[in-house]
Image (cartoon, grey):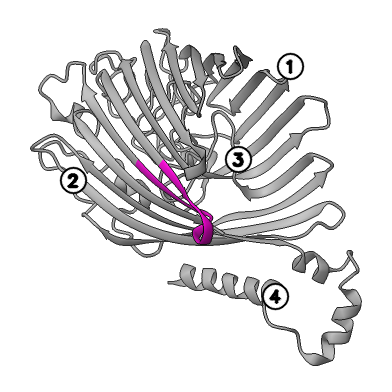
Protein backbone atom coordinates (compact mmCIF):
# COMPACT_ATOMS: atom_id res chain seq x y z
CA UNK A 1 0.00 0.00 0.00
CA UNK A 2 2.87 2.36 0.70
CA UNK A 3 4.13 2.06 -2.89
CA UNK A 4 0.63 2.81 -4.25
CA UNK A 5 0.38 5.88 -2.02
CA UNK A 6 3.73 7.18 -3.21
CA UNK A 7 2.81 6.63 -6.85
CA UNK A 8 -0.56 8.34 -6.38
CA UNK A 9 1.13 11.28 -4.65
CA UNK A 10 3.57 11.55 -7.55
CA UNK A 11 0.68 11.69 -10.05
CA UNK A 12 -1.15 14.36 -8.06
CA UNK A 13 1.93 16.52 -7.60
CA UNK A 14 2.78 16.22 -11.29
CA UNK A 15 -0.74 17.22 -12.28
CA UNK A 16 -0.98 20.19 -9.91
CA UNK A 17 2.54 21.57 -10.44
CA UNK A 18 2.74 21.17 -14.18
CA UNK A 19 -0.82 21.01 -15.52
CA UNK A 20 -2.97 21.96 -12.57
CA UNK A 21 -4.95 24.86 -11.14
CA UNK A 22 -3.89 28.54 -11.33
CA UNK A 23 -1.57 29.79 -8.64
CA UNK A 24 -2.95 32.15 -5.96
CA UNK A 25 -3.84 35.66 -7.17
CA UNK A 26 -0.95 37.37 -5.39
CA UNK A 27 1.49 35.41 -7.58
CA UNK A 28 -0.23 36.11 -10.94
CA UNK A 29 1.82 39.20 -11.75
CA UNK A 30 5.12 37.46 -11.13
CA UNK A 31 4.01 34.41 -13.12
CA UNK A 32 2.90 36.50 -16.10
CA UNK A 33 6.19 38.38 -16.07
CA UNK A 34 8.22 35.16 -16.18
CA UNK A 35 6.17 33.22 -18.74
CA UNK A 36 8.31 34.45 -21.64
CA UNK A 37 11.60 33.96 -19.79
CA UNK A 38 12.95 30.65 -21.05
CA UNK A 39 15.45 30.44 -18.19
CA UNK A 40 12.89 30.00 -15.42
CA UNK A 41 11.79 26.77 -13.80
CA UNK A 42 8.14 27.66 -14.41
CA UNK A 43 8.76 27.96 -18.16
CA UNK A 44 10.65 24.67 -18.29
CA UNK A 45 7.89 22.81 -16.40
CA UNK A 46 4.98 24.34 -18.29
CA UNK A 47 6.58 23.60 -21.65
CA UNK A 48 7.25 19.95 -20.92
CA UNK A 49 5.59 16.91 -22.45
CA UNK A 50 3.00 14.77 -20.68
CA UNK A 51 2.17 11.28 -21.97
CA UNK A 52 0.24 8.24 -20.86
CA UNK A 53 -0.30 4.57 -21.66
CA UNK A 54 -3.16 2.24 -20.75
CA UNK A 55 -2.89 -1.50 -21.50
CA UNK A 56 -5.10 -4.57 -21.24
CA UNK A 57 -3.62 -8.03 -21.76
CA UNK A 58 -5.38 -11.39 -21.94
CA UNK A 59 -3.18 -14.48 -22.23
CA UNK A 60 -4.06 -18.17 -22.17
CA UNK A 61 -1.89 -21.28 -22.52
CA UNK A 62 -3.37 -24.58 -23.68
CA UNK A 63 -1.02 -27.50 -22.97
CA UNK A 64 -1.49 -31.03 -24.21
CA UNK A 65 -4.07 -33.22 -22.44
CA UNK A 66 -3.19 -34.12 -18.86
CA UNK A 67 -1.00 -31.06 -18.25
CA UNK A 68 -1.99 -27.76 -16.61
CA UNK A 69 -3.54 -24.91 -18.59
CA UNK A 70 -3.47 -21.27 -17.55
CA UNK A 71 -5.08 -17.91 -18.28
CA UNK A 72 -4.65 -14.35 -17.04
CA UNK A 73 -6.32 -10.95 -17.35
CA UNK A 74 -4.19 -7.89 -16.61
CA UNK A 75 -4.89 -4.18 -16.86
CA UNK A 76 -2.59 -1.28 -16.16
CA UNK A 77 -1.94 2.39 -16.67
CA UNK A 78 0.97 4.77 -16.42
CA UNK A 79 1.88 8.39 -16.98
CA UNK A 80 5.14 10.15 -17.71
CA UNK A 81 6.48 13.66 -18.00
CA UNK A 82 9.55 15.21 -19.59
CA UNK A 83 10.37 18.83 -18.90
CA UNK A 84 11.15 21.41 -21.55
CA UNK A 85 14.80 22.17 -22.29
CA UNK A 86 16.93 24.60 -20.37
CA UNK A 87 20.39 24.96 -21.87
CA UNK A 88 19.90 21.53 -23.41
CA UNK A 89 19.00 19.75 -20.14
CA UNK A 90 15.73 17.93 -19.40
CA UNK A 91 14.33 15.79 -16.59
CA UNK A 92 12.07 12.81 -17.22
CA UNK A 93 9.95 10.64 -14.93
CA UNK A 94 7.30 7.95 -15.44
CA UNK A 95 5.53 5.21 -13.52
CA UNK A 96 3.13 2.37 -14.21
CA UNK A 97 0.78 0.21 -12.14
CA UNK A 98 -0.73 -3.20 -12.99
CA UNK A 99 -3.79 -4.95 -11.61
CA UNK A 100 -4.64 -8.65 -11.89
CA UNK A 101 -8.32 -8.60 -12.84
CA UNK A 102 -8.92 -12.34 -12.80
CA UNK A 103 -6.52 -15.18 -13.49
CA UNK A 104 -5.92 -18.84 -12.77
CA UNK A 105 -3.68 -19.66 -9.82
CA UNK A 106 -0.28 -18.85 -11.31
CA UNK A 107 1.53 -20.14 -8.21
CA UNK A 108 0.10 -23.62 -8.72
CA UNK A 109 2.65 -26.28 -9.71
CA UNK A 110 1.68 -28.87 -12.32
CA UNK A 111 1.09 -32.08 -10.37
CA UNK A 112 2.41 -34.40 -13.09
CA UNK A 113 5.69 -32.66 -13.91
CA UNK A 114 6.38 -30.21 -11.07
CA UNK A 115 6.64 -27.43 -13.65
CA UNK A 116 5.60 -23.85 -12.88
CA UNK A 117 3.72 -21.39 -15.05
CA UNK A 118 5.87 -19.94 -17.84
CA UNK A 119 3.99 -17.27 -19.81
CA UNK A 120 1.13 -15.68 -17.85
CA UNK A 121 3.16 -14.97 -14.73
CA UNK A 122 5.27 -12.54 -16.77
CA UNK A 123 2.27 -10.20 -16.87
CA UNK A 124 2.67 -9.58 -13.14
CA UNK A 125 5.55 -10.37 -10.76
CA UNK A 126 7.65 -13.45 -11.52
CA UNK A 127 9.31 -13.26 -8.10
CA UNK A 128 5.98 -13.36 -6.26
CA UNK A 129 3.21 -15.31 -8.07
CA UNK A 130 0.69 -14.46 -5.35
CA UNK A 131 1.20 -10.71 -5.77
CA UNK A 132 -1.96 -9.38 -7.44
CA UNK A 133 -2.10 -5.80 -6.21
CA UNK A 134 1.27 -4.27 -5.26
CA UNK A 135 2.39 -4.11 -8.88
CA UNK A 136 3.63 -0.59 -9.51
CA UNK A 137 7.05 0.47 -10.69
CA UNK A 138 8.96 3.70 -11.10
CA UNK A 139 10.14 3.29 -14.70
CA UNK A 140 11.87 6.44 -15.95
CA UNK A 141 13.82 8.84 -13.79
CA UNK A 142 16.59 10.50 -15.78
CA UNK A 143 18.53 13.63 -16.61
CA UNK A 144 19.02 14.14 -20.35
CA UNK A 145 21.29 16.52 -22.23
CA UNK A 146 20.73 17.21 -25.93
CA UNK A 147 23.21 18.84 -28.29
CA UNK A 148 21.95 19.16 -31.85
CA UNK A 149 21.01 15.57 -32.76
CA UNK A 150 23.04 13.89 -29.99
CA UNK A 151 21.89 12.97 -26.49
CA UNK A 152 23.38 11.90 -23.18
CA UNK A 153 21.03 10.36 -20.62
CA UNK A 154 21.68 9.27 -17.02
CA UNK A 155 19.26 7.36 -14.80
CA UNK A 156 16.38 4.92 -15.22
CA UNK A 157 15.32 4.64 -18.87
CA UNK A 158 14.19 2.57 -21.86
CA UNK A 159 16.86 1.48 -24.33
CA UNK A 160 16.96 -0.59 -27.52
CA UNK A 161 20.11 -2.49 -28.47
CA UNK A 162 20.53 -5.96 -30.02
CA UNK A 163 21.10 -7.60 -26.62
CA UNK A 164 19.47 -5.27 -24.08
CA UNK A 165 16.01 -4.14 -25.12
CA UNK A 166 12.40 -3.73 -24.01
CA UNK A 167 11.19 -7.18 -25.21
CA UNK A 168 7.70 -5.73 -24.85
CA UNK A 169 5.69 -8.96 -24.94
CA UNK A 170 4.03 -8.73 -21.53
CA UNK A 171 2.44 -5.89 -19.56
CA UNK A 172 5.64 -3.88 -19.10
CA UNK A 173 9.07 -3.90 -20.77
CA UNK A 174 12.59 -4.40 -19.48
CA UNK A 175 14.17 -1.18 -18.19
CA UNK A 176 17.73 -0.23 -17.28
CA UNK A 177 19.56 2.29 -15.13
CA UNK A 178 22.84 3.77 -16.23
CA UNK A 179 24.53 6.22 -18.59
CA UNK A 180 23.74 6.11 -22.32
CA UNK A 181 25.03 8.16 -25.24
CA UNK A 182 23.70 8.62 -28.77
CA UNK A 183 26.17 10.53 -30.95
CA UNK A 184 24.74 11.59 -34.32
CA UNK A 185 26.98 14.45 -35.44
CA UNK A 186 28.62 12.42 -38.20
CA UNK A 187 27.01 12.21 -41.62
CA UNK A 188 25.15 8.92 -42.16
CA UNK A 189 26.69 7.45 -38.99
CA UNK A 190 25.26 6.99 -35.48
CA UNK A 191 27.31 5.89 -32.48
CA UNK A 192 25.64 4.49 -29.36
CA UNK A 193 27.32 3.52 -26.10
CA UNK A 194 26.39 2.96 -22.50
CA UNK A 195 27.14 1.63 -19.06
CA UNK A 196 24.26 -0.20 -17.34
CA UNK A 197 24.50 -1.01 -13.65
CA UNK A 198 20.88 -1.91 -12.80
CA UNK A 199 18.08 -3.75 -14.60
CA UNK A 200 14.36 -4.12 -13.96
CA UNK A 201 13.40 -7.13 -16.10
CA UNK A 202 10.07 -7.58 -17.83
CA UNK A 203 7.65 -9.29 -15.47
CA UNK A 204 9.16 -7.81 -12.29
CA UNK A 205 8.53 -4.71 -10.18
CA UNK A 206 11.95 -4.28 -8.57
CA UNK A 207 15.39 -3.10 -9.69
CA UNK A 208 18.40 -5.41 -9.53
CA UNK A 209 22.14 -5.04 -9.98
CA UNK A 210 23.33 -6.46 -13.30
CA UNK A 211 24.78 -9.55 -11.64
CA UNK A 212 21.67 -10.26 -9.58
CA UNK A 213 19.37 -9.72 -12.56
CA UNK A 214 20.80 -12.90 -14.11
CA UNK A 215 18.76 -15.86 -12.87
CA UNK A 216 15.42 -14.22 -12.10
CA UNK A 217 13.96 -16.21 -14.99
CA UNK A 218 14.23 -20.06 -15.00
CA UNK A 219 17.90 -21.08 -15.12
CA UNK A 220 17.80 -24.49 -16.83
CA UNK A 221 20.77 -26.81 -16.28
CA UNK A 222 24.55 -26.60 -16.32
CA UNK A 223 26.59 -28.34 -19.03
CA UNK A 224 26.90 -31.42 -16.78
CA UNK A 225 23.12 -31.74 -16.40
CA UNK A 226 22.81 -30.51 -12.81
CA UNK A 227 20.29 -27.79 -12.09
CA UNK A 228 21.76 -24.33 -12.55
CA UNK A 229 21.90 -22.20 -9.41
CA UNK A 230 23.51 -18.90 -10.29
CA UNK A 231 20.77 -16.53 -9.08
CA UNK A 232 22.34 -13.91 -6.74
CA UNK A 233 25.77 -15.55 -7.27
CA UNK A 234 26.94 -13.60 -10.34
CA UNK A 235 29.39 -10.75 -9.75
CA UNK A 236 29.64 -7.97 -12.32
CA UNK A 237 30.25 -4.22 -12.39
CA UNK A 238 27.77 -3.86 -15.23
CA UNK A 239 27.10 -4.01 -18.96
CA UNK A 240 29.24 -1.88 -21.23
CA UNK A 241 27.94 -1.69 -24.78
CA UNK A 242 28.82 0.20 -27.96
CA UNK A 243 27.39 0.20 -31.46
CA UNK A 244 28.04 1.93 -34.76
CA UNK A 245 25.35 2.16 -37.45
CA UNK A 246 26.45 3.47 -40.85
CA UNK A 247 24.14 4.11 -43.78
CA UNK A 248 26.32 3.45 -46.82
CA UNK A 249 23.51 4.91 -48.92
CA UNK A 250 19.72 4.98 -48.76
CA UNK A 251 19.62 1.23 -49.44
CA UNK A 252 22.47 -0.28 -47.41
CA UNK A 253 22.99 -0.15 -43.65
CA UNK A 254 25.88 -1.67 -41.69
CA UNK A 255 25.99 -2.24 -37.92
CA UNK A 256 28.71 -3.32 -35.51
CA UNK A 257 27.93 -3.92 -31.81
CA UNK A 258 29.82 -5.12 -28.78
CA UNK A 259 28.25 -6.13 -25.46
CA UNK A 260 30.78 -6.49 -22.63
CA UNK A 261 29.42 -7.88 -19.35
CA UNK A 262 32.22 -7.35 -16.86
CA UNK A 263 33.49 -10.61 -15.33
CA UNK A 264 30.89 -12.72 -17.20
CA UNK A 265 31.07 -12.70 -21.02
CA UNK A 266 31.57 -10.64 -24.17
CA UNK A 267 29.44 -10.75 -27.34
CA UNK A 268 30.10 -9.06 -30.69
CA UNK A 269 27.72 -8.63 -33.63
CA UNK A 270 28.11 -7.46 -37.22
CA UNK A 271 25.08 -7.00 -39.46
CA UNK A 272 24.24 -5.87 -42.99
CA UNK A 273 20.77 -4.84 -44.20
CA UNK A 274 19.98 -3.94 -47.79
CA UNK A 275 16.95 -2.95 -49.84
CA UNK A 276 17.06 -2.91 -53.62
CA UNK A 277 14.41 -1.71 -56.04
CA UNK A 278 13.83 -4.38 -58.69
CA UNK A 279 10.91 -2.80 -60.53
CA UNK A 280 8.54 0.06 -59.89
CA UNK A 281 6.44 -2.27 -57.75
CA UNK A 282 8.93 -4.76 -56.31
CA UNK A 283 11.74 -4.42 -53.78
CA UNK A 284 14.32 -6.99 -52.64
CA UNK A 285 15.04 -7.21 -48.88
CA UNK A 286 18.38 -8.74 -47.80
CA UNK A 287 20.34 -9.20 -44.60
CA UNK A 288 23.43 -10.92 -43.22
CA UNK A 289 24.47 -11.33 -39.59
CA UNK A 290 27.36 -12.82 -37.64
CA UNK A 291 28.08 -13.03 -33.92
CA UNK A 292 30.84 -14.29 -31.64
CA UNK A 293 30.65 -14.83 -27.89
CA UNK A 294 33.20 -15.88 -25.28
CA UNK A 295 33.26 -16.23 -21.51
CA UNK A 296 35.26 -13.82 -19.35
CA UNK A 297 37.23 -15.08 -16.36
CA UNK A 298 35.08 -17.85 -14.83
CA UNK A 299 31.78 -16.76 -16.38
CA UNK A 300 30.53 -14.86 -13.36
CA UNK A 301 31.69 -16.96 -10.40
CA UNK A 302 34.86 -18.91 -9.66
CA UNK A 303 32.73 -21.77 -8.26
CA UNK A 304 31.47 -23.86 -11.20
CA UNK A 305 28.24 -24.66 -9.30
CA UNK A 306 27.25 -20.98 -9.28
CA UNK A 307 28.62 -19.67 -12.56
CA UNK A 308 26.50 -18.46 -15.48
CA UNK A 309 28.81 -19.43 -18.34
CA UNK A 310 31.43 -22.19 -18.45
CA UNK A 311 34.92 -20.61 -18.53
CA UNK A 312 35.79 -22.24 -21.87
CA UNK A 313 32.44 -21.55 -23.57
CA UNK A 314 32.50 -20.01 -27.05
CA UNK A 315 29.57 -19.50 -29.41
CA UNK A 316 29.40 -18.60 -33.09
CA UNK A 317 26.20 -17.64 -34.88
CA UNK A 318 25.42 -16.46 -38.39
CA UNK A 319 22.23 -15.76 -40.26
CA UNK A 320 20.67 -14.43 -43.44
CA UNK A 321 17.35 -13.13 -44.67
CA UNK A 322 15.82 -12.66 -48.11
CA UNK A 323 12.51 -11.01 -48.84
CA UNK A 324 10.43 -9.46 -51.58
CA UNK A 325 7.78 -6.73 -51.43
CA UNK A 326 4.85 -6.62 -53.83
CA UNK A 327 2.20 -4.04 -54.74
CA UNK A 328 -0.49 -3.20 -52.20
CA UNK A 329 1.81 -3.68 -49.18
CA UNK A 330 2.23 -7.42 -49.49
CA UNK A 331 5.58 -8.98 -48.54
CA UNK A 332 7.22 -12.38 -48.22
CA UNK A 333 10.45 -13.14 -46.35
CA UNK A 334 12.54 -16.19 -45.46
CA UNK A 335 15.21 -16.29 -42.73
CA UNK A 336 17.92 -18.66 -41.57
CA UNK A 337 20.09 -18.76 -38.47
CA UNK A 338 22.83 -21.13 -37.40
CA UNK A 339 24.38 -21.53 -33.95
CA UNK A 340 27.42 -23.77 -34.33
CA UNK A 341 28.25 -26.74 -32.11
CA UNK A 342 31.26 -24.99 -30.52
CA UNK A 343 29.16 -24.06 -27.48
CA UNK A 344 25.92 -22.58 -26.13
CA UNK A 345 24.82 -19.13 -27.19
CA UNK A 346 23.89 -17.50 -23.87
CA UNK A 347 22.27 -14.14 -23.17
CA UNK A 348 20.23 -13.48 -20.00
CA UNK A 349 16.58 -13.61 -20.97
CA UNK A 350 15.93 -10.95 -18.35
CA UNK A 351 17.65 -8.37 -20.59
CA UNK A 352 15.86 -8.68 -23.92
CA UNK A 353 14.91 -10.77 -26.93
CA UNK A 354 17.21 -12.47 -29.42
CA UNK A 355 18.62 -10.30 -32.26
CA UNK A 356 18.40 -13.19 -34.74
CA UNK A 357 16.46 -12.84 -38.00
CA UNK A 358 14.59 -16.05 -37.10
CA UNK A 359 13.20 -14.75 -33.80
CA UNK A 360 9.52 -15.61 -33.25
CA UNK A 361 7.38 -14.32 -30.39
CA UNK A 362 6.91 -16.71 -27.43
CA UNK A 363 10.11 -18.73 -27.92
CA UNK A 364 13.87 -18.21 -28.18
CA UNK A 365 17.00 -20.00 -29.28
CA UNK A 366 19.08 -18.63 -26.42
CA UNK A 367 20.70 -21.36 -24.34
CA UNK A 368 21.49 -23.68 -27.23
CA UNK A 369 24.30 -24.70 -29.54
CA UNK A 370 24.23 -26.68 -32.79
CA UNK A 371 20.99 -25.04 -33.98
CA UNK A 372 19.49 -24.77 -37.45
CA UNK A 373 16.58 -22.30 -37.50
CA UNK A 374 14.45 -21.42 -40.52
CA UNK A 375 11.40 -19.15 -40.74
CA UNK A 376 9.11 -17.87 -43.47
CA UNK A 377 6.75 -14.89 -43.18
CA UNK A 378 3.84 -13.56 -45.23
CA UNK A 379 2.54 -10.10 -44.36
CA UNK A 380 -0.10 -7.76 -45.69
CA UNK A 381 -0.83 -4.18 -44.61
CA UNK A 382 -4.18 -2.55 -45.30
CA UNK A 383 -3.02 1.01 -44.81
CA UNK A 384 -6.38 2.75 -45.25
CA UNK A 385 -8.01 0.40 -42.78
CA UNK A 386 -5.19 0.55 -40.22
CA UNK A 387 -4.86 -3.23 -40.37
CA UNK A 388 -1.79 -5.46 -40.60
CA UNK A 389 -1.83 -9.27 -40.83
CA UNK A 390 1.31 -11.42 -40.50
CA UNK A 391 1.72 -15.20 -40.59
CA UNK A 392 5.05 -16.88 -39.76
CA UNK A 393 6.13 -20.51 -39.81
CA UNK A 394 9.39 -21.68 -38.26
CA UNK A 395 11.33 -24.93 -38.02
CA UNK A 396 13.96 -25.21 -35.28
CA UNK A 397 16.41 -28.13 -35.23
CA UNK A 398 17.90 -28.31 -31.73
CA UNK A 399 20.23 -30.76 -29.96
CA UNK A 400 18.69 -33.69 -28.11
CA UNK A 401 17.12 -32.69 -24.78
CA UNK A 402 19.66 -34.88 -22.96
CA UNK A 403 22.61 -33.15 -24.62
CA UNK A 404 23.00 -30.80 -21.67
CA UNK A 405 26.19 -29.20 -22.99
CA UNK A 406 24.22 -27.75 -25.93
CA UNK A 407 20.61 -27.71 -24.65
CA UNK A 408 20.24 -25.63 -21.49
CA UNK A 409 16.44 -25.62 -21.14
CA UNK A 410 15.44 -29.14 -22.22
CA UNK A 411 13.56 -27.92 -25.29
CA UNK A 412 13.14 -30.51 -28.07
CA UNK A 413 13.29 -29.67 -31.76
CA UNK A 414 9.99 -28.06 -32.75
CA UNK A 415 7.98 -26.24 -35.36
CA UNK A 416 6.09 -23.05 -34.63
CA UNK A 417 3.30 -21.10 -36.31
CA UNK A 418 2.36 -17.52 -35.40
CA UNK A 419 -0.57 -15.41 -36.60
CA UNK A 420 -0.31 -11.74 -35.63
CA UNK A 421 -3.15 -9.30 -36.40
CA UNK A 422 -2.96 -5.62 -35.47
CA UNK A 423 -5.56 -2.90 -35.92
CA UNK A 424 -5.12 0.83 -35.26
CA UNK A 425 -8.46 2.34 -34.23
CA UNK A 426 -9.17 5.64 -36.07
CA UNK A 427 -10.92 8.91 -35.29
CA UNK A 428 -12.21 9.36 -31.73
CA UNK A 429 -10.16 6.45 -30.37
CA UNK A 430 -6.98 7.43 -32.20
CA UNK A 431 -3.99 6.11 -30.25
CA UNK A 432 -5.65 2.73 -29.65
CA UNK A 433 -4.17 -0.46 -31.12
CA UNK A 434 -5.68 -3.92 -30.88
CA UNK A 435 -3.47 -6.99 -31.28
CA UNK A 436 -4.37 -10.66 -31.56
CA UNK A 437 -1.47 -13.12 -31.43
CA UNK A 438 -1.95 -16.87 -31.73
CA UNK A 439 1.02 -19.23 -31.37
CA UNK A 440 1.25 -23.00 -31.77
CA UNK A 441 4.40 -25.05 -31.16
CA UNK A 442 4.55 -28.65 -32.33
CA UNK A 443 6.98 -31.35 -31.19
CA UNK A 444 9.63 -32.65 -33.59
CA UNK A 445 12.42 -33.94 -31.31
CA UNK A 446 12.42 -36.87 -28.86
CA UNK A 447 11.00 -36.23 -25.37
CA UNK A 448 11.56 -39.74 -23.90
CA UNK A 449 7.98 -39.89 -22.56
CA UNK A 450 8.92 -37.21 -20.05
CA UNK A 451 6.32 -34.44 -19.96
CA UNK A 452 8.80 -32.03 -18.38
CA UNK A 453 10.17 -31.68 -21.91
CA UNK A 454 6.65 -30.97 -23.19
CA UNK A 455 4.76 -28.69 -20.79
CA UNK A 456 4.90 -25.02 -21.82
CA UNK A 457 7.36 -25.99 -24.58
CA UNK A 458 5.79 -28.08 -27.36
CA UNK A 459 2.39 -29.51 -28.34
CA UNK A 460 0.90 -26.37 -26.87
CA UNK A 461 -0.64 -23.08 -27.94
CA UNK A 462 -0.95 -19.61 -26.49
CA UNK A 463 -3.55 -16.97 -27.30
CA UNK A 464 -2.86 -13.30 -26.61
CA UNK A 465 -5.24 -10.34 -26.94
CA UNK A 466 -3.78 -6.91 -26.19
CA UNK A 467 -5.29 -3.42 -26.17
CA UNK A 468 -2.91 -0.46 -26.06
CA UNK A 469 -3.99 3.15 -25.71
CA UNK A 470 -1.32 5.85 -25.92
CA UNK A 471 -2.17 9.46 -25.10
Residue 182 rendering spot, x and y as whole percentages: 73, 36
Residue holding disc 4: 17
Residue 404 rendering spot, x and y as whole percentages: 29, 17
Residue holding disc 1: 248
Q: Earlier in the sequence, mark 4 or mark 3?
A: 4
Residue 159, numbered label:
3
Residue 109, numbered label:
2
Residue 419 sits inside the magenta stretch: no
Type of secondary structure dominating the magenta stretch = strand
User: Disc 1 or disc 4, which is closer to the eye?
Assistant: 1
Taking the image as shown, residue 228 lies to the left or right of residue 63, namely right
Q: Quadrant of residue 297?
A: top right
Q: Earlier in the sequence, mark 4 or mark 2?
A: 4
**How many numbered discs?**
4
Instruction: Report the Cα–Cα distance between label 3 and label 1.
Output: 24 Å
Q: Earlier in the sequence, mark 2 or mark 1?
A: 2
User: Disc 4 or disc 2, which is closer to the eye?
Assistant: 4
Of the pair 248 and 235, the residue shown nearer to us: 248
Instruction: Report the Cα–Cα distance between label 1 and label 4.
Output: 47 Å
For label 4, count other residues whose C-alpha is less than 10 Å away and answer few (under 14), some (14-19) or many (20+). some
Q: Earlier in the sequence, mark 2 or mark 3?
A: 2
Taking the image as shown, residue 437 lies to the left or right of residue 84, namely left
Of the pair 209 and 290, the residue shown nearer to us: 290
Amino acid sequence: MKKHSLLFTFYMVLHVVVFGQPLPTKHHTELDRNETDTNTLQYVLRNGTFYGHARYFFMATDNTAGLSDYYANAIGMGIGYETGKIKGFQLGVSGFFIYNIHSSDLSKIDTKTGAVNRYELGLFDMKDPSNHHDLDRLEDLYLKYTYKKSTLKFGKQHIKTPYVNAQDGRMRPTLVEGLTIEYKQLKNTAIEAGWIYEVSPRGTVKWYSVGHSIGIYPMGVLVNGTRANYETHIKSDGIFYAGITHNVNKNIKLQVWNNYVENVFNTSLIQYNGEYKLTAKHKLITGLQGSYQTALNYGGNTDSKFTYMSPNNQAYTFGAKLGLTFPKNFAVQTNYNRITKHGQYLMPREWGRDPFFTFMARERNEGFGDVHAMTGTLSKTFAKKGLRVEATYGYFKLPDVKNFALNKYGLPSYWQANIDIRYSVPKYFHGTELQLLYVYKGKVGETYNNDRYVINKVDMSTLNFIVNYHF
